[in-house]
Amino acid sequence: MRKFIMIGATILVAACTRPAAEVEKIEICTEVGDFGMLVNAIEITVNNPRSIKGLTAADFDLVNNVPGGYMNPATGKMYEEYQDDGIVVSTNKNILRIEATPFNKAGRREDFRNIIPWELHCSIDSALNVTPDMVAGEKIDVLDDCIKGSFTFAGLTREYMLHLPKDKDGNVIPNVPLMVWQIGGGEYDKDMMTVATANRCLVSLAKQGIPCAALVFAIANPNYTYSASLYPEKIELIDRNNALQMAFIDQLIAEGKVDGSKLFCAGASSGGGCTMRFMMQFADRFKAAIPCCAMDPIVPIHQVEEKYPGQYTDDVEKVWKSDKAVYKWNGTDMELGAMNIEAFVNLPMFFVHAASDRTCKVASTYAYTEARKRLSATQDKMLIYSDEDLAKWNVPAMLSHFSWVPLLNDYAEGSSMNWLVKQM
């Protein structure tokens, strides 16, 4: 670029070139998306602030930047690059910040196997080009502010991540409601960050600005699989994990972090099944629960055909009425015992499922709700998504199991999360 300076009647041409950037560090700012991590900003630290002065959005272009997810349900094809990257450029001393419409951290899928990494191109200075392999650090919205630790109870040690809401001055708000999320089978026996970023369970309420704590444990069970109820050792381990989580929640209550009268539980898939068992153990402790696309750790339902219409419901009701319905911690070990039926049916539940779910068929939700009606439950609600409903949340029909996506995003009147928030 040339700068023209008028001195008297003489025009002098002074070369005014921006010095080439020397990059010291590149970091990305990310957030948890519905189908994995999304990048919402790139921060480039340079050694000379003059090298980034005057840069604008027009100087940058993102390629292979697509929404999160596997395919566009509107087209049935893989997502294409954003036509408008939504780039906003700002500088703070020697840091160049490039914000953009959030895009898939992994890049653009050519097909289900091949992914092309995203790239940032700068037309002014190639030193400001960025590829994922150049990134040295990551700032994760909400999760970076979570408490991470481990807890031991009933012979188990499990890692956890806990989000506690803060006021405008950055102070933790005491005695808030708590939502504890039960993870799906795909996250079993995985590291804590895999669990925390698998879906929006820890960030959903926080991103809505709702002052509610959120808790998730990394459960090291082997995936308990379909018809786990046929294997006492698997059911005992599920119930033991839930006893551990309840003991930790009691600690949070004792410390004044959580309001013990406003405890909520939700989970999806295997976690939906674990939510049901959690409420079988501790219905008197919780205010409401949301089982989503629930598995079958009570009686076999999935991959099992009914011998007669209504068999699933009959089988579930029989277990719930049994004097050996659920394992509970007796101070020394887990022991089979009866449920508190009165507390269980008085606990309101909001069941969520997709009609065409190919992984956990909707029959489980119908069986659970009908069996609860037989036990005199009157406050339950149910929301069954059609494929058209899921498409509105960018969930293609082939992923109809992912009903936790609308669950954790939808706060409109009539939604399960709106229902939950109203009880806080």
Image (tube, rainbow, N blue to C red):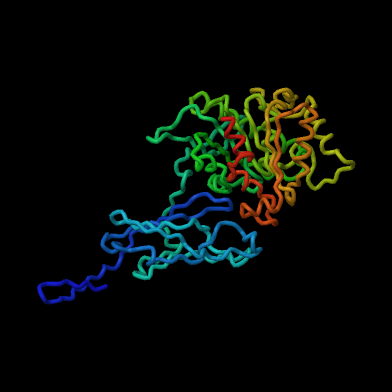
Residue 308 in the image: state x and y as whole percent.
89, 41
Q: Residue at x 68, y 54 (%)?
A: 399
Is 283 placed left or right of 123 in the picture? right
Query: Looking at the image, which is closer to me, 44 or 240?
Result: 44
Residue 20 in the image: state x and y as whole percent.
29, 68
Q: Can the viewer see residue 333?
A: no
Give residue 77's quadrant in the image: bottom right
Residue 276 in the image: state x and y as whole percent.
70, 35
Query: Looking at the image, which is closer to me, 219 or 98?
Result: 98
Q: Quarter holding the N terminus?
A: bottom left
Q: Quarter holding the C terminus?
A: top right
Q: Can the viewer see residue 161?
A: yes
Q: Residue at x 26, y 62 (%)?
A: 50
Q: Residue at x 47, y 52 (%)?
A: 30
Total tally of numbered discs in the picture = 0
Residue occupying the far front of the picture = 9
Residue occupying the far left of the picture = 8
**In the rendered image, the vertical position of residue 47 relative to residue 339, given as above or below:** below
Residue 178 in the image: state x and y as whole percent.
55, 32
Q: Residue at x 71, y 33 (%)?
A: 380
Give residue 217's quadrant in the image: top right
Is 267 placed left or right of 362 in the picture? left
**In the rendered image, the vertical position of residue 70 relative to residue 196, given as above or below:** below
